[in-house]
Image: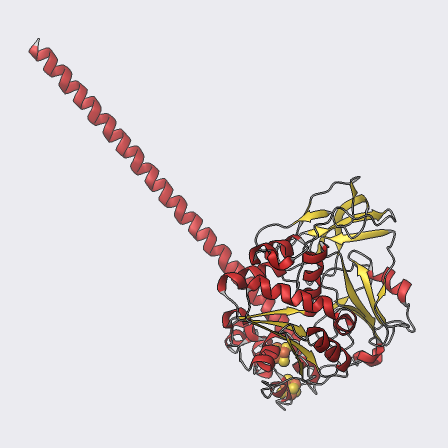
Amino acid sequence: MFRKSLRGGVHPTAHKALSNTSPIRRFPLPQRLHISMQQHLGTPATPVVRVGDQVLKGQLIGASQGHISAPVHAPTSGRITAIAEHTAPHPSGLPVLVVTLECDGRDQWQDTLVVADPYKLAPEEVCVRVGAAGIVGLGGATFPAAVKLGLSLKTGVDTLILNGGECEPYLTCDDRLMRESATDVIQGALLMQHAVQARQVFIGIEDNKPEALQIMQTAAAGTGIEVRAVPSRYPMGSEKQLVQQLTGKELPAMSRAADSGLLVHNVATARAVYQAIVEGRPLISRVVTLSGGAVTHPGNWEVPLGTLASELMNHASGFDVTPARLIMGGPMMGIQLPNLHVPIIKGTSGILALTSEEIQQKQPEPCVRCATCVRSCPMGLQPLEMAAAIRSGNVKAAASLGLHDCVGCGACSYICPSSIPLVHLFNYAKGELAAQTRARQKMENTRVLAQRREERLERQAREREALMAARRAEAARKAAAQAAEEQAS
Ligand code: SF4
Ligand code: SF4
């Protein structure tokens, strides 16, 4: 077994026991669902329903747009009552288009496409069905799963890795899912293996989840899938760390797993693939962890997409104390929420309500150059140097120090004794660089368009000149012919 010594990483308090001891509960249908058209990385889906339409559970309500996008389906039956912009938990913070569905309580499915033997499907067909089911990376990345599978099939992948690390503190949705739906996860992994024709499959689970590890190993027995324990250390859930632990391969800087013949997916994504291919069920709900010191009854809930986080919190728990911070996702990489009036989307792994003791907000102090951040960085970067460059306004220097390799895990911020918000600086600088690239791209596009216009005008002038010359020649030829005719007569 590969178990390379890990670079960097930190050991934040896990807080897993708050929510991992009770089974996943099913959230009852709310009166209304607010279904975002932007639940994935890439171009938002476009509504294909109108206000007043009746829809069935599983029916397509948002069509994917372009290459990197994912469709959206109705989580239950009912009537569309609004299509309008709404604040949604998207990193951009911008309002997104949301379809509001008044649930009719019948929860009536549309006809589903059930497959008796999914392994008779061609690999390409599995990818197509995963795409049609609107499945995205459920670990939080929300990249459309079918795009990843299709590219992997095209370029050739040797190894499929399922990420059961769940290294973010508080989150236990994957832990409970593996314990309670291990067979579905394993079947989904086998279908993904079939889709990309991978030679081998590994599943990595942090060794602080012994129950999930044992249940998954039992479920995988005889399938050829290897379920392995990986050390509990944040950010073990990052692609590069997991690949290194399971295969011994170190992914080069600025490269993706696919460049090394590897495909990494989350365990919950595998279960969604199983449900889509075998049961004909699109992605319309997900398991969400409710946790944090302010939450009265932490736990895991299977929630229809579009449920307001406030409704989930009120029904499931309520607060012991007023939360000091609300987060969607984990505390290290999640999105801070202004309030809970946002819908649950495909990428919502958790809703956390933390107390002021838990967030320990301290005023940043000057850097003491202790290099703790350097030792904690799993990517081998120099956070203090990058931060210094960004603070002096030189984001390009930060880029040359490897900013693009920063996975935004926040380990450096967590460990910094001076409480310097390093990861926020890096996210800001990445945004600046992206804006500069977009501006350069825009200028380049304008230059190319202007050059093409110039070339078109020159070509048109040449064509006009050639036409005029041809007409003059024709007129001269006719005049000469006429003169010759007159002379002859
Ligand atoms: S951990 Fe904080 S104080 Fe120490 S070198 Fe890094 S930025 Fe400076
Ligand atoms: S946020 Fe970036 S720089 Fe900081 S530890 Fe993680 S990868 Fe390294």
> At x 73% / y 49%, what residue is drawn?
112
Q: Quadrant of the N terminus?
A: bottom right
Judge whether 372 appears above or below 337 on screen: below
The answer to whether residue 367 shows anywhere in this view is no
Q: In which quarter of the image is the C terminus?
A: top left
> At x 53% / y 80%, what residue is drawn?
250
Q: Is residue 27 left or right of residue 46?
A: right
Q: Position of residue 78 (x, y in %)?
A: 82, 45
Q: Is residue 356 left or right of residue 246?
A: right
Q: Where is residue 86 in the image (x, y as percent from the top left)?
A: 76, 53
Q: Position of residue 188 (x, y in %)?
A: 67, 65
Judge whether 211 appears above or below 270 on screen: below
Res 475 quadrant in image: top left
Colour scheme shown? secondary structure
Name the quadrant where ligand 1 sits.
Answer: bottom right
Q: Where is residue 325 in the image (x, y as percent from the top left)?
A: 81, 72
Along the line of sight, which residue is nearer the eye, 449 or 216? 216
Along the line of sight, which residue is nearer the eye, 186 or 97? 186
Res 426 quadrant in image: bottom right
> At x 50% / y 61%, what residue is drawn?
154
Which residue in the rendered view is the most extreme toward the top?
489
Judge whether 246 appears above or below 338 on screen: below
The answer to whether residue 198 shows anywhere in this view is yes
Count the marks: how many?
0
Q: In this view, does 44 lie to the left or right of 302?
A: left
Res 370 quadrant in image: bottom right
Along the line of sight, which residue is nearer the eye, 120 or 459? 120
